[in-house]
Amino acid sequence: MVKVAVLIANGTEEIEALTPVDVLRRAGVECDLVSVNGTYPIGSHGITVKADKTIDDVDLLDYGAIVVPGGMPGATNIADNSKVINALKNAMQKNKVVAAICASPAVVLATNGLIDGKTATCYPAQAFIEMMSVTNYTGADVEVDGNVITANGPKAAMKFALAICEKLGVNPKF
């Protein structure tokens, strides 16, 4: 079974990080919450989360799927990490699952040329939509284009997590 890394940073939207972790673990998937800002990043709503691992403890290339939550400035903190961007580029080249929600489809994926020409969605702020100009932006809750899954924000967190499970061929037990 594929291992999944769910990234987290200071300023990450907590529901967008923790919902996929919870749902994937309920499906029996080995899922690590990997922080780019130390062991105890503080989310966008002031919730301190204990990461399973830090970016310095892992090789993201060992994971079959990488999940990138949104939130600001969390998405920027993730996008500013060259190890993450290099791993995402490699994952895309190897047709691994890459999933991003809220600001991250725009801030992390689109600005790094990772979803050019893909059908995708993101948080419906005008600045993010403008960053998505090289994609077929839809505004839908969730979009799946090949092995890329995008979602538009906190309200879509459960749909996003279930789309990841479906793409991985696993079923969570609720």
Image (cartoon, rainbow, N blue to C red):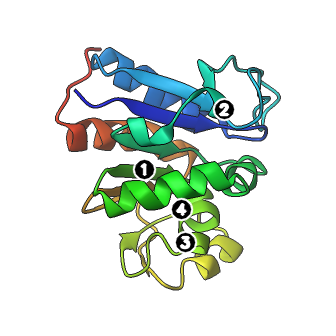
Q: CA distance from mark 4 to mark 2?
A: 23 Å
Q: Please tell me which residue lies in front, 87 or 44.
A: 87
Q: Please tell me which residue lies in front, 143 or 50.
A: 50
Residue 75 against residue 92 in the figure, above or below:
above
Q: Which mark is residue 110?
A: 3
Describe the element under mark 2 as helix, strand or loop: helix
Residue 122 coordinates in the image, percent (x, y) = 53, 63
- Is disc 4 surrounded by few (<14), some (14 to 19) or many (20+) residues within 10 Å? many
Describe the element under mark 4 as helix, strand or loop: helix
Identify the amino acid type marked 1: Ala
Give the mark nearer the N terminus: 4 vs 1.
1
Q: Which residue is mark 2?
A: 56
- Is disc 2 surrounded by few (<14), some (14 to 19) or many (20+) residues within 10 Å? few
Q: CA distance from mark 1 to mark 2?
A: 21 Å
Identify the amino acid type marked 4: Pro
Quadrant in which the N terminus appears: top left
Q: Which mark is residue 105?
A: 4
Q: CA distance from mark 3 to mark 2?
A: 25 Å
Residue at the image position 53 percent from the left and 62 percent from the top: 105
Q: Which residue is mark 1?
A: 99
Quadrant in which the C terminus appears: top left
Describe the element under mark 1 as helix, strand or loop: strand
Give the mark nearer the N terminus: 4 vs 3.
4
Quarter assignment of residue 111: bottom right
